[in-house]
Image (cartoon, rainbow, N blue to C red):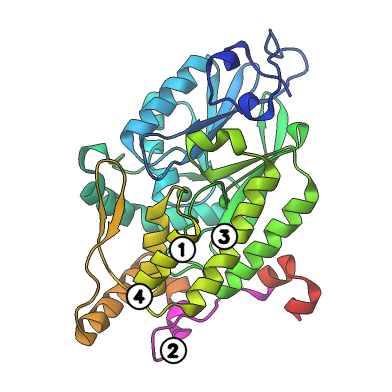
Amino acid sequence: MRFNTACRASALFLSAVLSASCATQPASQNAQLELELFVSEPDEINVVSALIIGPTEMMVVSAQGTKSAANRLADRIEETDRTLRYIFLTHPHFDHHQGASVLKARFPMARFVASPDVARLQRVRAPMDDEQSRARLGANAAVPYVLAEDYPADTIEIDGVPIELWRGIIGDAGLGYPDEPHTALYIPSLNALLPSDAVYHDAHVFLGGSSRESRMIWSAQLEGWLAREFEIVVPGHMAKTSLETLSPEVALSHTRNYIATYEAVLAESETSDQLIAAMIEKYPDIRHRQGLYLGAFFDFFEFRSMLIDKAGNVAAGPGPASPQEAEAQRRQFEAVRRAYNPPDRSDRESQAVDCCGTPRSSLSYAAMQRFLPASLAA
Ligand SMILES: [Zn+2]
């Protein structure tokens, strides 16, 4: 793995994690790729963007979710002095796509791309994401959105070096689409996996959009990745301060263990407040509590507000005060769930909702087959 000379100056470089020494010259003859991480701070969400840098070209994976973070990312891209060829969207969540509006404005020649299944979902969700971000972030909302173009190929190249695109990966899911498709990137020359929000490091994992079945597949996928012995795994979310402890093993097992803990705690919780309190007791020091709160509200079909102070501390707004209010929230929840997904998916999902509003799995048999051990998939 090669690093450019600037890596000494920044704790954000992966070299800091791997304790590798820096080469004095960037690779230029046999194009070698370098990898650099940008973690948004101050920001409780802590989105990780990956910069894949070649001798003359580069691409960025995840565009950040706020105007300020995307502008800082754009500054860093400019400093690399490479041509930004692609802005890659791994999954259509606001914290990974909205910053593309800033990046496209600063680098108009860069292509904003996603696998067709991801791009399709972004087209449906982007207007609602804009609305929510305007309400939540005010002037710092990176709006209006730009749409990713379909990128159907299995590889993408930077300076002629191929990067594999693994489509249909299971990770954190938006409302109403447990098996929402993510695209992971794999750089063979670095043995590096960029699974975005299928892996979190030292952070609460957003699990409310998932189902038991999708979490089972997700865990099996993580087990498979643990066995692959990647050199590098880049999580979708982590605190900048956690770079020192980042390793493929630690990040993959944190995510797998967190999912198992959440599943056990959820089974014993009667309210979202109980679920949140128990998870914070088990993970008192990790970041991204917004993901935990929102996920817990989703799991109990609630439309509660989240109160976030300037330091990033999170608290839950009041829960439903009566059974009638709980029912009204559940109806509202269902309406948003329909609006947030393509019509074919909403129809299929709504048929799979039982009398009490509990969504059943909509996972395809093919997806199950792909990741589950044969004994479970049968
Ligand atoms: Zn995310």
Q: Which residue is mark 1?
A: 279
What's the residue type where badge 3 is placed? Tyr
Could you classify mark 4 by the number of other residues whose Cα lies within 10 Å: few (under 14), some (14-19), or many (20 or more)? many
What's the residue type where badge 2 is placed? Asp
Q: Nearer the viewer, mark 4 or mark 1?
A: 1
Q: Which residues are magenta?
A: 347-365
The residue depicted at 54 percent of the width and 37 percent of the height is 242
The residue depicted at 63 percent of the width and 30 percent of the height is 17
- Element type at marker 4? loop
Image quadrant where residue 59 sits = top right
Could you classify mark 1 by the number of other residues whose Cα lies within 10 Å: few (under 14), some (14-19), or many (20 or more)? many
- In this view, the residue in front, 16 or 362, is 16
What's the residue type where badge 4 is placed? Phe
> Residue 301 bears which disc, if any?
4
The residue depicted at 57 percent of the width and 54 percent of the height is 182
Q: Nearer the viewer, mark 4 or mark 3?
A: 3
